[in-house]
Image: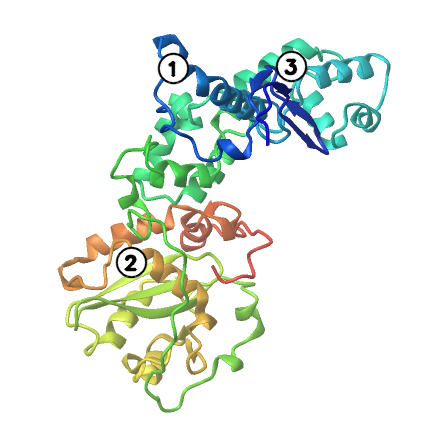
């Protein structure tokens, strides 16, 4: 076959449903024949370029440039394939914020008296988005598209100072209360009660927890976690523990025979008790008043195996008879002399069901609070009565959610001093906490 001496122009095209992409340059390509399938000489190297003056580079450079240009055009214009600069500009837009053209349309709709739903249909977003956009930028009377767009970009700037970092007075108060071993939730609700008309002194308990645990923030200091109940430097989820049985006591009176007024916490003078164990055999006894959550910590110098009944009787004897009516205890063998205790003080002693410590939930919750000071592996005999009274005072002076954020001391001490006043109650007052 004769070798064709003519040349033809070839335009590279790619047709898709989204459009047609073409290389803008046309190159002359010599048509190949059967005789050209095996070249007489080796092909020129790819490193040769037309600018180098090498004749061989002129043969392959146009085709290579055409292919590179084709892929460059495809990468910059194909749907769904954006360059890095375009992606960066798009992602830098404020999250969930309408662009300026939508804000301009919204401003025109506000001027025309349209509702948020009508404006949402115009700009193509949810009505709640329009409502929040208008509310955060001064309302319908003061909304301006340009200032709203500028404010959105300002709010999107990162990093942003936290609430505690930007409010020194709030940071000082939170530090002081945290030093007193208050929980973040107690601090948050106390601020609302103490400063009801100052919105700058408001903070959520989760924000306080983040300032304690999130790395990079730590406005409250690196050692702030030691003031929490757990004392952990890392947050952990609560895991329920399996309850275990106790020994069997004689002549026990079941908690099911307890008067209704005790279960409803309708009057003061009904106590719950248990032991808080340390390094064996050290322990202390805890007594919690059901209505006011007032706690008394009783030292046991000889451990939990001796003189538990006499220590509890000596402590409850300091109270007037009207404030020691009943005692609810777990099925521990330390209360084997419960009949003698009942005869000495003139109160009834009731026992929980087997494996049911939740039936004296106020005492269980208080024991968990006391674990912040009375560790499980510590020798509790080294704590004097004065030390234990100081620990109990820390618990009794904290605001409690179950008391409507009043303290246990505020609810119990007026009755002890002969000035009875009904304790502060909340909808959670019937819940063991």
Q: Nearer the viewer, residue 247 or 21?
A: 21
Between the residue at mark 1 and the residue at mark 2, the CA separation in whole angstroms equals: 80 Å
Quick check: 97 left or right of 335?
Answer: right
Label placed on residue 49: 1
Measured from the top left, where is residue 216 in percent x and y?
A: 33, 32
Residue at 35%, 74% (x, y): give it.
345
**Which badge, 3 or 2, is on the more N-terminal residue?**
3
Q: Where, by quadrant of the figure, is residue 253 drawn? A: bottom left
Of badges 3 and 2, nearer the viewer stands 3
What residue is pinned by disc 2? 371
Mark 2 burial class by Cα count in 10 Å: few <14, some 14-19, many 20+: some
Specify the label residue 148 is tagged with.
Answer: 3
- Mark 3 crowd level (few <14, some 14–19, many ≥20, 10 Å Cα): many
Which quadrant of the structure image shows residue 218? top left
What is the spatial separation of the Cα atoms under label 3 and label 2, in whole angstroms? 52 Å
From the image, state whether disc 1 or disc 3 is nearer to you: 1
């Amino acid at each position: 076959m004769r070798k064709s001496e003519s040349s033809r122009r070839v335009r590279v095209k790619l047709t898709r449903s989204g459009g047609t992409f073409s290389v803008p340059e046309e190159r002359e390509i010599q048509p190949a024949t059967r005789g050209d399938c095996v070249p007489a000489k080796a092909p020129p190297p790819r490193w040769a370029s037309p600018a180098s003056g090498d004749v061989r580079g002129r043969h392959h450079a146009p085709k290579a440039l055409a292919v590179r240009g084709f892929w460059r055009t495809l990468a910059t214009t194909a749907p769904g394939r954006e360059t890095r600069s375009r992606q960066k500009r798009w992602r830098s837009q404020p999250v969930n914020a309408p662009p300026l053209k939508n804000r301009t349309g919204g401003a025109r709709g506000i001027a025309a008296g349209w509702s948020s739903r009508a404006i949402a249909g115009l700009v193509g977003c949810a009505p709640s988005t329009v409502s929040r956009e208008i509310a955060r930028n001064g309302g319908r009377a003061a909304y301006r598209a340009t200032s709203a767009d500028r404010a959105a970009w300002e709010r999107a700037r990162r990093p942003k100072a936290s609430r505690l970092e930007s409010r020194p007075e709030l940071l000082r108060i939170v530090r002081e209360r945290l030093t007193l071993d208050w929980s973040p939730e107690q601090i948050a609700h106390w601020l609302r009660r103490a400063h009801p008309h100052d919105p700058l002194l408001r903070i959520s308990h989760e924000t306080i927890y983040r300032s304690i645990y999130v790395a990079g923030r730590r406005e409250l200091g690196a050692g702030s976690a030691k003031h929490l109940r757990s004392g952990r430097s890392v947050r952990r989820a609560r895991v329920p523990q399996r309850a275990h049985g106790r020994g069997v006591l004689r002549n026990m009176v079941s908690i099911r025979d307890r008067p209704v007024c005790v279960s409803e916490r309708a009057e003061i003078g009904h106590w719950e008790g248990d032991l808080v164990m340390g390094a064996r055999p050290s322990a202390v006894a805890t007594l919690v008043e059901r209505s006011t959550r007032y706690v008394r910590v009783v030292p046991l110098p000889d451990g939990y195996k001796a003189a538990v009944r006499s220590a509890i009787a000596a402590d409850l004897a300091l109270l007037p008879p009207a404030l020691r009516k009943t005692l609810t205890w777990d099925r521990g063998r330390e209360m084997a002399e419960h009949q003698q205790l009942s005869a000495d003080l003139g109160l009834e002693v009731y026992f929980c069901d087997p494996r049911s410590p939740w039936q004296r939930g106020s005492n269980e919750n208080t024991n968990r609070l006391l674990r912040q000071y009375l560790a499980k592996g510590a020798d509790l005999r080294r704590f004097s009565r004065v030390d234990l009274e100081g620990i109990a005072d820390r618990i009794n002076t904290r605001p409690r959610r179950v008391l409507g954020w009043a303290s246990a001391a505020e609810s119990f001490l007026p009755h002890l001093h002969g000035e009875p006043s009904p304790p502060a109650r909340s909808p959670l007052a019937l819940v063991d906490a």
